[in-house]
Each structure stands twice: as C-alpha cells, then as structure tokens.
Amino acid sequence: MNLIEVDNLSILNRFTGEFIVKNLNFHIKKHTCLGIVGESGSGKSMSMKAILGLLPSNLETTGCVRFGTVEMIHAEPETLRKIRSKHICLILQDAMTAFDPRLTIGKQIIETFCENMNYTVCEATEATLDILKKMMLHDPRLIMQSYPHQLSGGMLQRCMIGLAMALNPEVIIADEPTTGLDSINQRNVLDEFKRLRGEGMTLIFISHDLGVVRYLADAVLVMRQGRGIEYGEAAQLFANPVHPYSKYLLDTRKGLTKAFGELINKGATTSC
Amino acid sequence: MQVWQKLKQDKMALLSLGIIISIVVTGIFAPFLAPHDPLATNIKIKFAEASLSYPFGTDQLGRCILSRLIYGIRTTVFLSIVTMLLTITIGVSFGLIAGYLRGIVGEGILRFCDLLLSFPSEIMILAIVGMLGPGIGNVVMANIASKWAWYTRMIRSLVLEYSDENYIHFAKVAGYSNLYILCKHLFPAILGKVLVLATLDTGWVILNISALSFLGLGVQAPTPEWGMMLNEAKNIMTIRPSLMLAPGLAILIIVAACNFLGDSLRDTLDPKHNPIKAGMKL
Amino acid sequence: MLKVESVYKSYKKQNSVIFSSEKQEILQDISFEIQRGECLGLIGESGSGNSTLSRLILNLEKPDLGEITMEGKPIQSWLKSHRGEMSVVFQDYTTSINPFFTIKESIAEPIRRSKFKYDKQTIDHMVLDLLEKLHLSRQLLVRHPHELSGGQLQRICIARAIATRPHFIVFDEALSSLDVSAQTQILLLLKQLKQEMNMTYLFIAHDLPTIASLCSTVMFLYQGRIVEEIAVQKLSQVQNPYAKKLIDSVVNFD
C-alpha cells in the first residue's frame, strides 16, 4: 500500500498568480526511499512543505495528498501538527536556522525528546549522547553544552539528522541533508540512512546531487521549474533516462567526478 | 526613489508623515497662522469658550490657547528635533568608531558609555538641569547627555553585526580605507535602523521636554510650550479640566505620528521588504 | 609566491569561565607554499580550520605564531602596496554583496577604488566585459542581490573578484552552496579564467572530485594540521590514513 500519495499537487502564489509547483504526481510505498532531484528553484522543498502544511498563507495548495487515510491539504491544523510530531519528520535544508540560537544544543535536543517521546531528562540525556556519538561528533558532552553559533554548519546538520532519526517517525523527509558535508561525513550520514531504510523507515530524500540519490533511492522523481519531469524506478532511470533533462543532469554529474574517477582508477591499475 | 515608492503604499506612514510635516510647517509660519499674540493677556476674557475669534478658547490669563499651541510648536517640536539630531550625530559617530575599530579605543568608548548608562536617564536629566539651572539650552544639553551613550551602544552592536558580513570582509581584502568602508558600507546599512530609533525616540524627547517644563525646570513662563501649558492647566484642573485637553492631545498626536512613522520606515528601508512579493522568496 | 611558515592560531574557548586562559587550538604548525600560476586545493572537514586559514591568509586576522608572506613581503604590507592584486570569493554569496548596492555598483566598486584611475566610460565597458565573460545578462546590472539566484550571485562575486585582474584568488568553499549544474558551469569558467588571466588559486573545499578537476596540488587538513600534500596526478598514492579514508568515502558515480 502507498504510504503517501500525491495527485496533481499545485502551489499557486495568490498575489502574483504564478505557479510554483504544477500538477505534481508521485507516491511512496512503505519501507522504500524516494529520491527527489532537481536544481535549486525546481520546487522540491516547497512540495514537501506543502504536504506538511508548512507554507505561508499567500501560497495556495491544491490537489490531493494522502498520508495513509488522512487527506493532508484540507486537514485541520491540529491533525497536521500531530502527524508532524509523530509520523513524519522533516529535516530542513539550513541546519543553522533550525536550532534556536538562544539555547544550547543539548537543551534543545533533550526538550524534543521529552516532548515527543515522553522520556525523563535522564533518559533524554542518554539518548542525546547516543545519537551524537552515532553521528561521529567528537566530544558529545562539549557539543551538548555549545550554542548553535559555536558549531560549524556540518556539525549542526549531523545533530539535526541524528535527532530526526532518533525520534523514530514513520517517514523522514530529508532536504539536502548532505550538502556542505565532506565526503567522510557524507558517507556516514548516508550509511545511517541506509541502515534506517533497512530497518523499515520510509524515506524521502531531496538532493541536487544525483550521486547521493542513487546511493539510497528505490524510486526517483526529477523536478524542474515546479513540474515533475520524470518519475520511475531508480535503477531504470539511472541506466536509461528518458527525458533529455534527466540525461543532462546525469551527464553533468558524471562530468564532475570524471577527472577524480580517472585518477583513482589509474592508481588502482598501476598499483596492482 | 525606491524608498519613496514603498513608503507611498503605506497609508499609515503617509498619514503620520503628513501630520508631522503640517505641524512643522505650522510652527515655521506661526506668526502668520496664529490668530493672536500668544503672550497677550486679557483677564476680562479668561476661560472663554471656543469661539470664532478664539477657536480653542482662552486660558486662565485670557491668552488664546490656539495661538499658544501654534507658537508652542516652535519650542516643543523644534527643540526635540534639534536634540534628536545632535544626539544621533554624537551617538552614531562614537558608535561607528567603537564598533569598527574595537581594540583599546573601542573598549574605552564602550566602558565610558556603560558608566553613563548606569545612571537612570530621568534622574540624570533632572540632575543636570538642577545643576545648570532651568532654561531651554540646559534642557537640550541634559537630554543629549543622557541619551547619546545609549545610541553609541546600539550603533556599536549593529556595526559589530554588519562587520561580520562577507561584503565587509571583501572590502577589507580589496584594500578600501577604513573611512570608506565606514561611510559607504556600514553607515547606509545602519542608517535605516538609526532613523527608526530616532523617530521612535523623538516621541520620548518631546515627552521629556514637556515633562521638564511641566515640573517648571525647562522652558520658563510665559514662553508657550506644550508641557508648560499642561502644567498651568493642572493648577486649575478643578475649575477648568478642559484646558488640559488641547496641549495633551497635541503631544499625543505628534508622539503617535512619530512612532507610526518609525515603524513604517523600518519596513521600507529594508531592501528585501516588498509587500507584494513577501512569501515568494522560499 | 605565497609562503606560510609555522602558523599557529587558537581561540579562547567560548564556554570557559571568565578570565580563564583555556584556548582551543585551531591551527597548528601550518607550513606550505604556493607558486605563481599554481592551483592549490585545501581539503578538510568543516570545523578543521580551513576557514580560519583563509582568514589568516587574507589578513582579516593575525596568526598567534608564524609568518605569512607574499612575494617575500609580510602579507600586511604586501596588501597595502598591491591593492587589488588579491581577491576572495566566499561560500555564503547571500552576504557577500552589499544588499543596498545594485549589481553594477558592486562590480564597478573594486575598479573604481583601484590604484589606477579610469573614467566612467571605461569602467562601464569593463563591467560589461566581465558580465560577458561569466555568461550573465546585462539586465542583472540594475537588480539588487536578493533578486538573483544562487548561481547568478556567485558568478557576480567571481566577476567582482576578477575585476581588478588579481594575481591571487582565494576561493573559500565558493562552490559548496551551489547545485550540481551551477558547480559544473562555474568550475569550467574558473579553469578558463585561470588560463586566460594567469592567476594563482587557493581553492578551499570539502569536495575532492571538484578539487581534483581544478587543482594541480592538494593539501589535506586534519584537526588543525596538514597531514598530506600531494600532486593531484598522484592522488591514488596518498599515504596518510585520513586522506585515504576521504578518498575511499567519495560516493562513486560512473
């Protein structure tokens, strides 16, 4: 059964009459990972926010979005809030602004745990240390005592991802979670996501990096300027993209790592 | 100008601006607009009701209230503007220096400001006027002395915030002189915030000058000043409470107009603020 | 050209008690050289000190110990006498341009403030030239920064950086905030510009493939120390375990 179904999702700016997203169609089966790819401005983040009811009031959402049996677009705010806290977790793109600058990281994560999982403060502290260690952050205790502006963007991102994972929702929507991370951390985060997927988590992974999407996704949706360009199984799409835009994205990505790949392979062949 | 375009769309701002400008113009042309001499007393017609020749009636000495209000603009409003301008000039200059140069100079200025700010401003004004004696000049000086340090601190923290922006870093790497960076990059950035603070504070200054005159420490009789008029009306509150209305309302109107204008200025001076496009940015 | 010798930099630990002298070492014993015309890539984890190092090289901060010299002179005095010959492109393009300036003013500013005095017409020509080089439309000239997309803005920053024909440019994670197609286009551009204008680059990034396609040498920075410096051609022969781990963890795409 499809966990999330999106039919003809459109987002309209009431003041300018422009469509930010038009007629988007996709669905996600339980325990699978959907990768959404596209350049910046293609509407990827906006569509996710629309599903969760997080868009500002000047943007009008039309169409049909179903989470299980719940219809999301015209749902009551209280219903949406319950869903957002327990069932669907959204990891935002800009980690720096997702944390309250006035509180320490530790306080915020513990607060989230106590709110959502009904932990005691002790249990929450343990859980926090656990996720910070899992995210390969040195000195978890120091990080818990630090304020957001004292940590680098990469560290904050990992804190957010760790927190989202630990909340154990049914669906995690991750918006560009590995942008800005170096390869080692990126690999760590991706492996964590892979492990979660193996344990049954449903994932929506938004990225402009095809490499990262290919590593994780079962299905892929390519977006451009607010429209769905191509949608299908990952293996199929990466092997034989149909739409010229998908081909262009793939070729561009290949081009970026071509030089690197050649250097490594050259070394591999000469050393053996 | 783009700012003017945006301001035009804000009805409240236009209204406030209109009120302030008309009050200022009235004050400038007071001799032509006031129906009577504000200092001319005529006991025979004291406490007169509003009439054609005396639109707001007369006070306890038979002086025309409307004329006193109009001439009072010159004292109350103009004094406040002068005070504000001087306070801002001093506060901004020191704030820019303290924020940009930091080091010993910056720290020194900051500590001195901290010292001044440890005195409650009302007490400080009273103390200065008490020491120097009542009078308009001293009132202005007292107001400036009590407020410039606050501006310096505000501006300094703004400068610190903006100094960390990448375009300032680029300017430093490109070798622009410190003075150029201060004037061309930092000052315009903080100007918007300064203007907002200034308009909001103008209300405070007007109230202060009026309060001092109310207490008898500022402008001396018989010079018309709105606070003074309140003071005189207070003495005969039991006989004629309506005499407090005119100056009280006048103060209320101009302070409110300044506050609303300040609010609107804050929005319009932000280059990103576009009332129609707000929300498209995501 | 650029020489960094035994540079150390530390900051006071932020959470420590007042008056305590606990310091956090960010950079330790950094030494390297960049020759004219070279492109050196610097790679390190975020938080490992690469931004601090770039700030030291740009003379925005001073090292605690050690020396940074350019063409033999200390960087401070070199910058004063060679105004406009060093430039920088930052990662965060949203704060890299004064929001009150138009694009035209932003690009023209370094030209106007340079040692050489140009008249208005020449400056206008130069600005248009730069726009063309970076494949940007003239219509952008009257706009403000917040009206442009990320890729466009970063290209404006590059245009501004090369406006004074500098010899040395520091790219501090300049491509990290852009999407893949913008990255590809700008990488190509940077290669062309480097050849055309014979510039020297210090390219700080956390993405190895990007460095591999642009730079001739790469330096690995780990926990504040340089752990390996190697020619890009010999990348497969790295010795240091951190560098090896970094190379192995790059998500393959072929």
Image (cartoon, coloured by chain):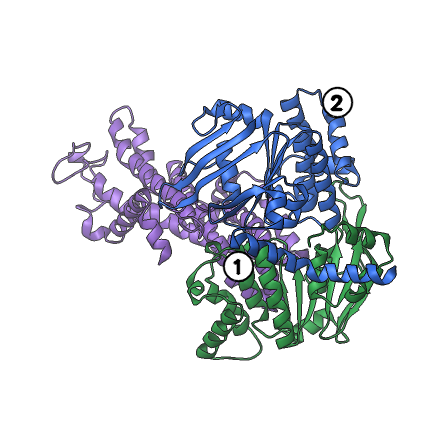
Query: In the rendered structure, which amino acid carries the disc numbered 2?
Result: Cys
Label disc, if present, on residue C103 of the rendered structure: none
Whole-percent x and y of residue B94? Answer: 56, 55
Tell me which chain appears purple.
B
The quarter of the picture where residue C139 lies is bottom left
Label 2: which residue? Answer: A122
- Residue bearing the label numbered 1: C153
Q: Position of residue B37 (x, y in %)?
A: 20, 47
> Is A39 placed above or below A57 here?
below
Q: Which chain is blue?
A: A
To the question of a shared chain for discs 1 and 2, the answer is no
Given residues C179 and B28, the one toward you in this image is: C179
The chain to which mark 2 is attached is A
Q: Quadrant of residue C185?
A: bottom right
Q: Give the x, y percent position of residue C168.
A: 67, 71
- In the rendered image, residue A270, in percent from the top left (x then y), is placed at 85, 63
Q: Is residue C177 left or right of residue C201?
A: left
Q: Which chain is green?
A: C
Q: Is residue B111 visible?
A: yes
Q: Is residue C217 above or below residue B195?
A: below
